[in-house]
């Protein structure tokens, strides 16, 4: 079992990077391969997935990312290939979505449907710890538009009111403000 690998990134692909350590190139599947720079040295936390027909290494830029990945893969119906793209997003945002039971946020990830999103919330709510208490998700505009679409509002109507909504509010407050403006 590996905890981490410290080495130089020698190759970057759309799904993985290759990290060279002591003349051995380790192929690591990562959530955001293009966030790494070829030729730079990195310390990557590693998870080794052993299956009957496959041995795969997954790399994470932080311990928190790896811990969240392990928690997500412990949920029934969520495998490594489903959990990895979720980590390309903000770790705190995912934790916040789980704690607030925000199914719309979780469903924006590939292969995550309503049933899997509900299972993630059911299994992980109250079991995840974020670095910051009282998280405010910074990228709530996309989340807000998804919520308004789900309520049946048209994109043209949303474009008119989005600039009028104050920044820095939590998603629930932004939805309330948006509804007030839409109902005028």
Image: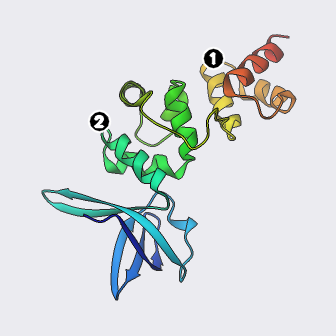
Residue 139 is labelled as none
Q: What percent of the width, then of the height, locates residue 184?
A: 86, 11
User: Above or below — where is 145 with respect to 48?
Assistant: above
**Residue 81 position in % (x across, y down):** 35, 51
- Cα separation between marks 1 and 2: 28 Å
Residue positioned 79% across, 19% down in the render: 177
> Which corner quadrant holds the N terminus?
bottom left
Return the residue found at the far bottom.
23
| Residue occupying image coordinates x 74% and y 17% | 176
Could you say which is closer to the camera, residue 49 or residue 82? 49
Which residue, given by chain and number where applicable, does mark 1 sit on?
151
What percent of the width, then of the height, locates residue 6? 43, 75
Q: In the figure, residue 48 lies in which quadrant?
A: bottom left
Residue of label 2: 77
Say whether disc 1 or disc 2 marks the residue closer to the N-terminus. 2
Q: Residues within 10 Å of mark 2 (few under 14, many from 20)?
A: some
Quadrant of the rendered image containing residue 11: bottom left
Q: Height in image: 176 above or below 142?
A: above
Label 1 or label 2, whichever lies nearer to me, is 2
Q: Tell me: 180 left or right of 107.
A: right
**Between 178 and 56, which is closer to the camera in this rendering?**
56
**Disc 1 and disc 2 in contact, CB within 8 angstroms:** no
Q: Is 148 positioned to the left or the right of 7 in the image?
A: right
117 lies above or below 1: above
Identify which residue is drawn at 38% across, 82% down. Answer: 21
């Amino acid at each position: 079992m590996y905890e981490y690998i410290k080495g130089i990134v020698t190759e970057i692909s759309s799904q993985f990077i290759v990290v060279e350590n002591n003349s051995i190139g380790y192929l690591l599947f990562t959530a955001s391969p293009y966030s790494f720079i070829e030729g730079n040295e990195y310390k990557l936390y590693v998870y080794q997935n052993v299956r009957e027909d496959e041995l795969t290494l997954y790399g994470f830029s932080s311990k928190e990312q790896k811990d969240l990945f392990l928690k997500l893969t412990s949920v029934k119906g969520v495998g490594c290939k489903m959990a990895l793209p979720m980590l390309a997003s903000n770790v705190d945002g995912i934790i916040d979505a789980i704690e607030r039971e925000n199914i719309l946020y979780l469903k924006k990830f590939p292969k995550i449907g309503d049933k899997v999103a509900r299972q993630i919330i059911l299994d992980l709510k109250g079991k995840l710890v974020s670095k910051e208490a009282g998280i405010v998700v910074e990228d709530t505009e996309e989340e807000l538009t998804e919520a308004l679409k789900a309520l049946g509002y048209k994109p043209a109507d949303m474009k008119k009111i989005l600039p009028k909504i104050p920044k820095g509010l939590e998603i629930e407050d932004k939805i309330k403000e948006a509804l007030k403006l839409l109902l005028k």
